[in-house]
Image (cartoon, helix red, strand yellow):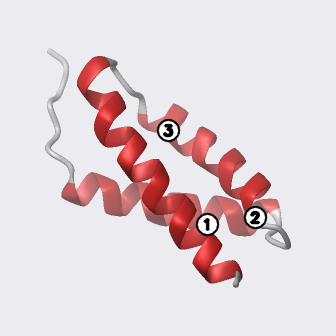
């Protein structure tokens, strides 16, 4: 059950980032912190350290698959 909630939360955040990245400049640190808070609140029974580990893994995955457009 916890796994499914974490996966749904991650997928939802990825979709949000796909849309948000079209209209705003996003920083990795802000995305990471926001996702830690979302995971910590959405996945009951997950402590903050685990939420941080999951968020770091998700952000690393997103960076691997997203088309980066570095700022000049």
Residue drawn at x 14%, y 44% is 67
Marks 2 and 1, how far apart in space? 6 Å
Is 52 rendered above or below residue 13?
A: below
Foreground: disc 3 or disc 1: 3
Res 71 → quadrant: top left
Marks 3 and 1, how far apart in space? 14 Å
Residue drawn at x 56%, y 58% is 55
**How far from the left and from the top, in percent, is residue 60?**
38, 59
* Left or right of residue 43: residue 66: left
Residue 39: which disc?
none
* SS at circle 3: helix
Is the residue under label 1 in contact with that under label 3 (CB below 8 Å)? no
Residue 53: which disc?
1
* Left or right of residue 9: residue 71: left
Is the residue under label 1 in contact with that under label 2 (CB below 8 Å)? yes
Front-lying residue, 61 or 1? 1
Marks 2 and 3, how far apart in space? 17 Å
**How far from the left and from the top, in percent, is residue 43?**
74, 66
Is 71 rendered above or below residue 9?
A: above
Is 8 rendered above or below residue 14?
A: below
Front-lying residue, 13 or 27? 13
């Amino acid at each position: 059950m916890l796994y499914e909630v974490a996966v749904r939360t991650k997928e939802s955040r990825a979709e949000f980032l796909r849309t948000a990245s079209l209209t705003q400049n996003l920083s990795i640190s802000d995305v990471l912190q926001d996702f830690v808070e979302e995971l910590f609140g959405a996945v009951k029974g997950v402590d903050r350290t685990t939420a941080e580990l999951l968020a770091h893994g998700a952000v690393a995955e997103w960076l691997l698959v997203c088309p980066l457009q570095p700022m000049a």
